[in-house]
Image: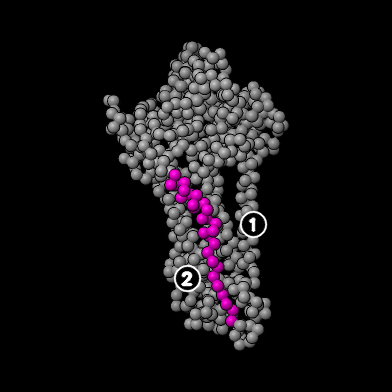
Amino acid sequence: MGNWVVNEGLSILVILVWLGINIFLFVYYYIVYLDERFYYTRVLVGDALSWARAPAACLNFNCMLILLPVCRNLLSFLRGSCQCCSRNITRQLDRNITFHKLVAYMIAFHTAIHIIAHLFNFERFMDAQLEQNETIAYVLSQIGNGDNRPYLNPIRTNETNPTFVAFTTIAGLSGVASTLALILIITSSMEVIRRSYFEVFWFTHHLFVIFFIGLVIHGVGEIVRGQTASSVLTNKPSNCAAQYKDWGKVPDCPIPQFTGNPPMTWKWVIGPMVLYVFERLVRFWRSKQKVVITKVVTHPSKTLELQMKKKGFKMEVGQYVNLQCPSVSQLEWHPFTLTSAPEEDHFSVHIRIVGDWTQQLFEACGGEKKEFQEAWKLPKMAVDGPFGTASEDVFRYEVVMLVGAGIGVTPFASVLKSVWYRYFNNDTGLIPKKIYFYWLCRETNAFEWFADLLQSLETQMLEKGNADFLSYRIYLTGWDEAQAAHFTVHHEEENDPITGLKQKTLYGRPNWENEFKTIAGNHPGARIGVFLCGPEVLAKSLSKQSINHSDADPRGVHFIFNKENF
């Protein structure tokens, strides 16, 4: 249990607090609409009133939260401010997308309840308007007809239907627009669509503007109505409901007065909306700053390296930027991890060519051309960032495990380059004393662009007499038997035949159980940072191993798991 608390305790506490607030708001507002002020409204629609209003309160709360996890500049600012705080506090900021998704699911859940409850409400409003036998529901529905008296039943005539009302009122139209926008946003966010059709995901996500506009004006229609406070004093439902036929005829039971609930949603969401608008303005301003491409390199395995310069650009290890290429698309922005080190005079990204946008960028940069490209022929680029990630915390641990899968090695290229520069400059303030680096790849040619960096690090560590500082293992996960036999033949050579490094390339997949046991045995009592940039399946495996091999004793070894999220 102690192991689990170290890695997940604070995250679970945050989720429980969030769930607790949702439950409190639901129960509180459910009870509010059981109040005497809404007695006559419940005569018309029953308990569906509370079932509509309770999730509406939860929607306000969650819509207040949904924009905050995607305010990247705010998160980067908080990350910088939290550097002096506990690592666990900083790690919560790295789970911003996970929390964003959870809040979105909660919004969808409460929206469904709200819609279903209002479908019942409108049917019952219509039924009350159609009553012809002088029931209390009929009398309440007639209040306000022809005398400009404040009404209770929003359906004002028996010659209509709920569908017509839904598409001809402010509340109905805004509700339909917000619901359609929400459905498109959520369905296009499914993993299969996001990975295969990123443009669909990206464009439909911007329907959030319609969603929020609809959300804010939804309450203006004041569909839900109740007795005024003064009317409750003169026409107490407990005394006058049974005398509804004599309302206005007896002094103790005048005709009740009604009013709509004033719109409240804007009070919940105005703060986050202002923050988000400011966030977008900052991004727009930064995107207009001039960016110069200084070098384009085409690496094996269809990987494009762009080296760029931008005035005033400052970065930390492991951060990422959003790139836009106007000649490819005026609207699309894509995140890429920085592979350069803060000590370099430029910043760089490595882009794997896997989709339409990356393929068009590859062609625009002359990736398929053999001849030298003139700088003025290269496309213009816009850069937004840099933004913080989990890898920024690498230099807060004395012992570090870095695990990259495929192109997921990019944040660790920045880390290892920075380590090289710090060793080269004899930086005595370097906190990490041991780095374990694992790279899992399917193809051999994917290693070529990264092998030079590892060779430089090998040489540097040997010259400094600290060869044990960096231990790395490179795994080929896509080898067949013939390739494995070739590996065995060359195993005795001094340098690896694939990478040219002294450390031999391995094939298959790591035995993480053994790796964690070995590292735990080598560093008793240490806080070991585990950093991953890779698929979710690998993340679950490493997270589980981090928990299983952490000591229950606070003085023992603890593996702290961190994962890159975009």
Kindly indicate the quadrant of the structure image that contains residue 58.
bottom right
**Span of residues in magenta:** 255-282
Q: Tell me if residue 281 is in the magenta stretch.
A: yes
Mark 1 burial class by Cα count in 10 Å: few <14, some 14-19, many 20+: some
The residue lying toward the viewer, choosing from 494 and 529, is 529
| Residue 162: mark in rendering | 2
- Label 2 residue SS: helix
For the point 43% across and 34% down, which residue is it? 312
Name the kind of residue labelled 2 in the image. Answer: Pro
Q: Residue furthest bottom?
A: 249
Is the N terminus in the top left, top right, bottom left or bottom right quadrant? top right
Asked whether the residues under the numbered discs 1 and 2 touch, taking CB atoms below 8 Å apart as contact, a structural biologist would say no
- Label 1 residue SS: helix
In the rendered image, the vertical position of residue 83 relative to residue 486, given as above or below: below
Provide residue 233's location: percent of width, then percent of height. 65, 77
| Residue 24: mark in rendering | 1
**Rounded to the nearest whole Å, what is the CA distance between mark 1 and mark 2?**
32 Å
In the rendered image, the vertical position of residue 466 relative to residue 159, given as above or below: above
The residue lying toward the viewer, choosing from 390 and 534, is 390
Provide residue 37's location: percent of width, then percent of height. 62, 72
Name the kind of residue labelled 1 in the image. Answer: Phe
